Amino acid sequence: MTSETGPSLGGRAARQAGEWVPALVVFVLVIAAWQGAITAFSIKQFLLPAPGDIVRSCWTDRHSLWPAGWYTFKEALGGFAIGSALGVLGATVIGRFRSLGSALMPVFIAANAVPIIAFAPIANVWFNPLSPHSKMAIAAVLCFLPVLVNTLRGLQSASPRQIELMRSYAASEIEIWRRVRVPTALPFLFTALKVASVLSMIGAVVGEYFGGSFNALGVLIRSDAQILNFERAWAGILVASVLGVALYAAVVLAERLVVRWSPERRVS
Amino acid sequence: MVLAALVGLWELYRWVWTSAGWTWPFRVDDTSMPHVWRIAKAFAEPAQVNQPALITVLLHKTLFTAKEAAAGFGLGAVVGFALGVVLVHSRLLQRGFLPYIVGSQTIPILAIAPMVVVWVNPKLPGSLQGWGAVAVIAAYLTFFPVAINTLRGLQSADPRALELMRTYAASRWTVLWKLRVPSSLPYVFSALRLAATASVVGAIIGELPSGIQSGLGGAILNFNQYYSLEPQELWATNVVAAALGIVFFVIVVAAEKIVVRRAPENVA
Amino acid sequence: MSEAAVPAVVRIEKVTKTFAQGNVTALQDIDLELAPGEFVSLIGPSGCGKSTLLRVIGDLVEPTSGTVTVNGKSARQARNDGDYGIVFQDAVLFEWRTVAKNIALPLEMLGWDRARRRQRVEEMLDLVELSAFANHHPWQLSGGMQQRVAIARALAFEPALLLMDEPFGALDEMTRERLNLELLSIWEKAGSTVVFVTHSISEAVFLSTRVVVMSPRPGRIAGVVEIDLPYPRTVETREEPRFFELVTEVRELLRKRGEHLLPEEEQLLEDAS
């Protein structure tokens, strides 16, 4: 008899906290070693600023950094939303026709091997480099393929038995879609969305590198690095990472809320 | 055939949008979407006076970028694999480092590229000057999928097979090479496929801020500035970059076919 | 038996099914009739088409020729009217639904309102003794419990006909025997007609009013054994001499057909070699 209702809530929270202790220890050690090495070997500022200085720069330059980060974040978010939506839409259409899917799969695989980031300057030309739309476009293109391919794979991996069961209820194709295929595809979709969340931020920053409005993070980091203001450049990177992690975390949270049925299988 | 379809779609889109006068999502003209034959012709013509044909120039640049990407791929694959092997033997290290390995990928690589160049370059011997730093950036993008999938693959060994090995009193080392590594190969190769593309992306991105002119990234930056005059040259460069990505991918797939002589599994 | 008097729940006439791939004749000239309230097992070696026959009754597979009538209607019409429930070898639960919601699935499809659904689900959970697990997800249940949920789901809308495709095939012997008893008591309470596909001779004899023995290549009926053991059957039923006689009878039928090949089968074997 299985009656695993899980440990008490307090016990679970404690165990989860315990899982993060080693990560925290590593974090503290690395920061300490970093700060220590800089004072001990008097490493030059432009090579590697001290973590304290970077954090300080995050604060002192907050009026330029955070608005820039927000601006870039909005570009990434827009691209993420557009690209993912198109990917899901594409998978839905292709999923309706099995032969179309198998015919197009090699094309998608080849397209996935293309360094799409190289097309960032062209997106700038198409959508005006100063407008956020050009960055959204490149972020969207980056997100589109992984979402499309994974969603398609998810839709196609619905259990034949579950479909047969639905047939025995005389269910229509739409009902089979809604009650079997979509739930099956959801975990696949979220895996892709996690990848896409990271890609969209990278796409936005790289897009800005080829020209963008002055209050954008990518432009800011680039010009700071050029004028050897490395503290602020690093602070900008920190901001970009924090926002990237935030978007990623938001997707993970959404996944936990939506895909609540599966046993919590931590991916490694 | 796929190529022909792409060319057809390109020209059809051009024709429909220009003749209907649509400007959404962007204005279609000879600058934003040059005719395919103009791009093709650009290969045969010199980009600048007194220079060989563009195709010759691009080929040299491609080889240069391929060298960076291949070095980065090799470095990243070795580091990633080693990391996976170390982490599989210690839950503690896994908990300590895995969050940062995942987090490292949210850092927009382009942003830290200039810093990496500043760090790495002075420490490199003359023959590696410049491109060595780019290879490190490519490796940074490569190691992540390899590390994660190696770990997952090494963990995927059948628990009963592990028990069997214990009945032989096999050492950790023997278990690793006779059981864990073979069972991880499908996972590792699926990571290497991703890494092949990632290394090309890394090499191209890495060239941008490091001011290296001899690779494709430099060419993209360069032709980007003359885009309004000679759009076909940037397009031609991007076509070559796309081809390079696909070639890297195909090489890894071929290597996989030779090494893993069993049914290919779809491991993400 | 007075089958002619009562209308048959299932009437199978001259059903043949050939699969285009490999040119396999899964079923050939099958004739079978099921009276209301019967418990009929289909037994035979793998490849004899017993699962295909079950699917033909459920209109999940279309016969190449012949007709299937369920409740006096075409099999298609019967499926559209929700005349039968089905249980597979694996429970085929929807992992994203709780136990209660899995059982409610066919009721949702039939458009029952929420209150009615909840009441029926409670009754069914009671019947299969899983009331405490209503809000669990399938992965939290053992294999036997999952299969009970599947049975509850199949019976939820009180179908006149229950199709079961090796429902206990993946379970251990102890669980299987317990579920056999449970199934019989459910069947007696519900009064539905059951078609039960199995590999196990003793299971078939223990459960059924009739055992239909099938032979492979091409799938056809080798013989029918009437099981005259009285209901309710209990643990002791398995120890009665009559039980062993019937088991032997079924086994003989299965074996005889294995040893003596029909002329066309010999022909096939020659062709193959």
Image (spheres, rainbow, N blue to C red):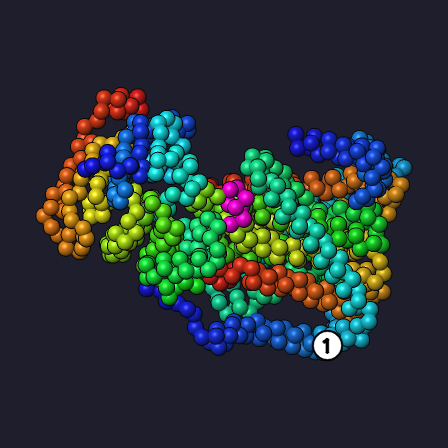
Measured from the top left, where is residue C135 in percent x and y?
43, 63
Measured from the top left, where is residue B216 in percent x and y?
76, 45
Measured from the top left, where is residue B200 in percent x and y?
68, 48
Q: Nearer the viewer, residue A194 or C145?
A: C145
**Point 29% across, 44% down: residue:** C193
Q: Nearer the viewer, residue B119 or C155?
A: C155
Q: Nearer the viewer, residue B107 or C53?
A: C53
Residue A265 left/right relative to C87 = right
Residue B15 left/right relative to B196 = right
- Magenta includes C133? no
Residue B163 visible, this angle = no
Q: What residue type is disc 1 on?
A: Gly
**Point 73% across, 33% down: residue:** B9
Label 1: chain letter:
A
Measured from the top left, where is residue C51 in percent x and y?
33, 39
Specify the segment rendered in magenta: A172-179
Q: Quadrant of residue B6?
A: top right
